[in-house]
Image (cartoon, rainbow, N blue to C red):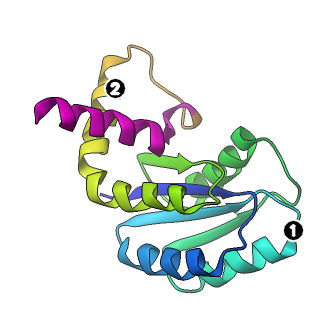
Amino acid sequence: MHVGLIIVFNHFKDSQLKSDFITSLKALHNIKICLVCNSNDDIVLEQLNEIAYHGDHIAVVSTKRTKSTSSAVKAGARYVYNHYNLKYVGYIADFSSLENFEFVKKFESHQQTIITLIKEEIAAKKVKQTYYQSLFSIPKHLDKVLAMSQKIS
């Protein structure tokens, strides 16, 4: 099952973060990744294109100018929707620090649990969601999964 991941960047300057990020994204073969450049800074776009070069499952979308976070996520969702047939698409807004990098690593390890949680949420809703309404926040759902695992243990 293919899952989509949209990551919004407003700035990206840390070279160590870049090399760690490339290594982590190479390991995510079954996830289609869309990196959204939400900045009019050419350096950020260049960095994201260098990252995308390292995997055919990684794409870059530019908003050309800085927009709201929700608009940037929607731009990534439009790309993912038009190029892939994915049922589950998560996003990380304003990726800029090592803290957000941890969300990618945790998503990788808890991916199946999060998808199960999303399926349950969709089944509980009586109204069918549109594509944009079915996007889910990875940090929010990771918090739920980690809270559930702490209750169990």
Is residue 139 magenta-colored? yes
Classify mark 1: helix, strand or loop.
loop
Q: Residue at x 66, y 46 (%)?
A: 73
What is the spatial separation of the Cα atoms under label 1 and label 2, in whole angstroms?
38 Å
In depth, the one of 81 and 8 nearer the eye is 8
Q: Is residue 81 above or below residue 59?
A: above
The N terminus lies in quadrant = bottom left
- Disc number at residue 121? 2
Residue furthest left as drawn: 153
Judging depth in this view, the residue of 38 and 29 nearest the camera is 38
Left or right of 46: which side holds 90? left
Q: Which residue is mark 1?
A: 41
Residue drawn 23% across and 32% down?
148
Quarter assignment of residue 15: bottom right
Against 42, is 102 above or below?
above
Classify the position of the C terminus by image quarter.
top left
Which residue is depicted at the point 20% across and 35% down? 150
Between 130 and 57, which is closer to the camera in this rendering? 57
Image coordinates of residue 151 in percent, x first then y, are 17, 29
Answer with the quarter of the image where residue 37 lies.
bottom right
Mark 2 residue type:
Glu
Query: Bounds of the magenta span?
Result: 133-153
Q: Which mark is residue 50?
A: none
Quadrant in the rendering for residue 28: bottom left
